[in-house]
Amino acid sequence: MGDTISFPHLDYAALWPMLILFGAACVGVLVEAFVPKAWRNTVQLVLSLLAMGAALVMVIKRAAAGVTAANAHTASDAISIDKAGLFLQGALLVLGIVSLLLIGERTLETGGPFVAQAAITVGSEADRRQAARESGATEVYPLALFALAGMLLFVTANDLLVMFVALEVFSLPLYLLCALARRKRLLSQEAAVKYFLLGAFASAFFLFGVAMVYGFANAVDFNSIHANISTSDKPFALLLIGLAMLAIGLLFKVAAVPFHVWTPDVYQGAPTPVTAFMAACTKAAAFGGLARVLYVGFDRSNWNFTPVLGVIAVLTMLVGAVLAVTQTDLKRLLAYSSVANAGYLLVGVLGGGAAGLSSMLFYLVAYGFAIIAAFALLTLVRDADGEATHLSRWAGLGRRSPFFASVFTFLLLAFAGLPLTSGFTAKFAVFGAAIGGGQTWLVLFGVLSSIILAFPYLRVIVMMWLSEPGDTTPSVSIPGALTSAALMVGVLVTLLLGVAPSSLLDLANNAASFVR
Amino acid sequence: MKYLSILTLVPLVGALAVAFVPRSRPQLAKQLAMLVSLVVLGVAVATWLAFKTGAGAPRLQLQESYNWIPAWGAKFAFGVDGIALVMIALIALLVPLVILSGWHDAERSQRSVPAYFALLLALEGMMIGNFVATDVLMFYLFFELMLVPMYFLIGSFGSDVQPKQRQYAAVKFFLYSLVGGLFMLAAVIGLWVLGGHTFDWQTLTDAEFATNAQRWLFLGFFLAFAIKAPFFPFHTWLPDAGGAAPAGAAALLVGVMDKVGTFGILRYCLPLFPEASRWFAPWAIALSLVGIIYAALLAVGQNDLKRLVSYTSIAHFGFIGIGIFAFTIQAGSGSVLYMLNHGLATGLLFLVVGMFVARRGSTMIGDFGGAGKLVPVLAGVFFIAGMASLALPGLAPFVSEFLVLIGTFTVNKTVAVIATVGIILAAAYVLWMVQRTTQGTLNDKLRDIEPMKKDLSLREGVVVAPLIALLLVLGFYPKPVLDVINPAVQATLNGVVSPERSDPAPATTVEAGK
């Protein structure tokens, strides 16, 4: 027996970031059990930040030590910590830290943005009591850590089964997090159920796709799949159906049309810090996974997935933009804009080659920071009933709080892609990669979509600056230190990546390679 | 001396400084803004003096270059040719006058006074940035950014009469420009990919592009410039924006900002895509001709002074358009001179209209009538501005319009003849406007309006005097400007048409014609 099963070699130096996060998440669960309630929030916050910081240090150390084709694979080739994977892990951790600051904010309202006990029936006497007094659940920290750890694994998974496990590991905590809003709890629970049901479907599709691909290639790891695409004697339809199903699972996570319908509801219902976390990190993780599947597993010239995905990219850009125009709620508006942005990212991915990959990496970071800052600002504009996200409530905000209105205007201009913001450089990168890759038609649709999408952004600007403040215009709360930090980081990075994007561009260019 | 970067940075830094002046001290903001704009004027004069003309002078002068995004080969590269220099001089001259004329504008709108002047200065810096850029991405940057201050000038500080219309105009302006800008972005990226990952204007000019690619890229750029200029049928935003903007901002919008469009055609479309330019020239000329006639007819029918002036500008841009696409040096130089003269004449007209509107509190022509009896001097200035606008001989626009027409006539008689109809229509809309506003019997209502009894104040006199003086001087002696313009126009057209074509230099013609 002894020689038939050998324990796979584990390169701990490469796995540390994930191990730290998973470990810290488990410790976080113990904290819930043993630390007195009054201390829990502080302990959890510090623990999570430390864990993410330590994981980031490990990622940087690993990157500094140098990644080669020889040392990239570990755990029997199930995990591939290559350059692109490391970049994505680093980006996920940085974006995760910034959104964790939002999750940790407790000064904006009593008890923070999360409900104390999600199980209490909405509207009951107990619910009223807890809404008024009790501090929010601190389980959100280990949940966020588990999700982030899952994402780190997801972007480095080198075979479809590990990828599926990672997908579930990061999805399940997100479903829970969505349901934990302190205000508008029914909306929040509805969002969670919707997200869970549709997400479960998507996962099932993914898993079925894995089975199909296994049927074709007799393997689930990307190297073998890639090698078998041209040599296998099985019916090619198996592979096509398999890839289509894998794509459905992944495109659901990136919120591409027609798998986007959950996005507005979930973004609106989830607690805003969680929305920020999902918009930045889930998107990055899902695109990282999608790119790896396409570039590493299925990139063979004897057949071509570009036209199909191209159509999806076009639909995503146009539908996202058009539906954004009709929105009257800011969270839904940003949700549809995030759908459209998934389309731009797809354009970059389809640009192909190192340029396409590096443009995608750059875009993910740029967009992540901007969207976190935008949601951070949304948490500040509030009245007695919590956040005031309806567009009409923002009328005349520029007169009441010129500073925050200016910041939000800047972020909107960044989303619209005006120069000197990260939105412009990011768009330039993906469109440049696409034209370079011969996909000019995608760029034309991208331009068209940007034009449409400029309108809703502009409408918000008009609301804030050119309309008279009404009686119901809420005030902007003074942010606590954590939200301020997240907001400032987001805005400064958005500006920095617009004015001097060189260092991140170089970083992304260097990182733009997967190891097969 | 790094003239050009200083020219760009001073107003931008000044804008930032003015923006941080507390709202409670409007006077300080105004003085600071004035000071900054005068410094810019001074630097612009120095730049003009440092610019070499005559044989052997290089086309792009006073060049500077700083790395921006090495990964893409993008630079902050500065440099001017004669065309850009003239436009910069126009900006530097107009902005102090606009600031002076708008001394009380912002107070009337009950918005932040420092913000108004900060926006004006920011706009100045960004407009200058367009003309000094020799890096395509840097040009695009300023081309797009310039929208933001103008958007707020229209939206926040526009005419108080109808806030809804003001919002509408601001959004329409922004969206139209953004549409053009984004198509240009696609073209810029295409240019960058095909041109070998560089944004350097000189390098790209030397590059050869395939016919098909050239035409698409040309279209991308041309669309942006045609919307900006604006040419028919992309013009509908201008009357709204011009009508809603405060008079000073409207003067800058029509006087200078729109010239970025025609400048862009001269600097980017023609040299980068010569073959496509020749191919599209008949279409561009057709659009220009339609614009001349159509906008003039609409101008005749306007009841709103600011909208009327906006429409006259669209007609004038038609002349600039046929001048550019006639591909003769006479017509080309005439077009560039037209860009300058139109800035002076229409700038003056907008400012004077603004003075009338400030007194009457209305932009409708019907609310005036016989105003000359109350404010004879102001009415006189209005008359001069009108005459400049219809290109009366002796005033500067005449020279440029004449050059455009004879330059076009030598290559295409039909176009020149049709365009001449525009001159007749110009006489109609200007004379009728002047007559309905200032001549005839005095509108009784005007008698009861206190401000209408004050004639041109000293401040307003200072605003209009330099413009009138320049219109007269350039009407009789345009040579100094033509000497600056000609080499650049010649260089621009050399790439497009074969140099053998006989084509007299315009300076001599003008002297003979005079």
Image (cartoon, coloured by chain):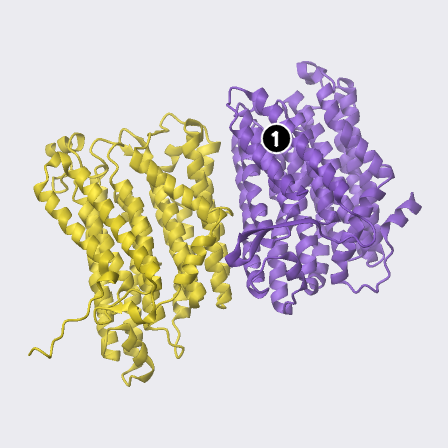
Q: Chain of mark 1?
A: B
Residue A114 location (% of width, % of height): 21, 39
User: Where B190 falls versus A215 (above or below)?
Assistant: above
Q: Which residue is mark 1?
A: B246
Residue B106 location (% of width, % of height): 58, 25
Quarter of the figure with residue B245: top right
Count the numbered circles shown: 1
The chain whose colour is purple is: B
The answer to whether residue A252 is left or right of residue A504 is: left
**In the rendered image of this protein, which colour is used for chain A?**
yellow
Residue at 25% over, 41% down:
A103
Secondary structure, mark 1, is: loop
The answer to whether residue A158 is left or right of residue B146 is: left
The answer to whether residue A60 is left or right of residue A7 is: right
Q: Is residue B208 visible?
A: yes
Q: Which one is in front, A98 or B380?
A: A98
User: Which residue is outermost to the bottom?
Assistant: A233
Quarter of the figure with residue B120: top right
Residue A357 location (% of width, % of height): 40, 63
Q: Which one is in front, B283 or A195?
A: A195
Q: Which one is in front, A458 or B117?
A: B117
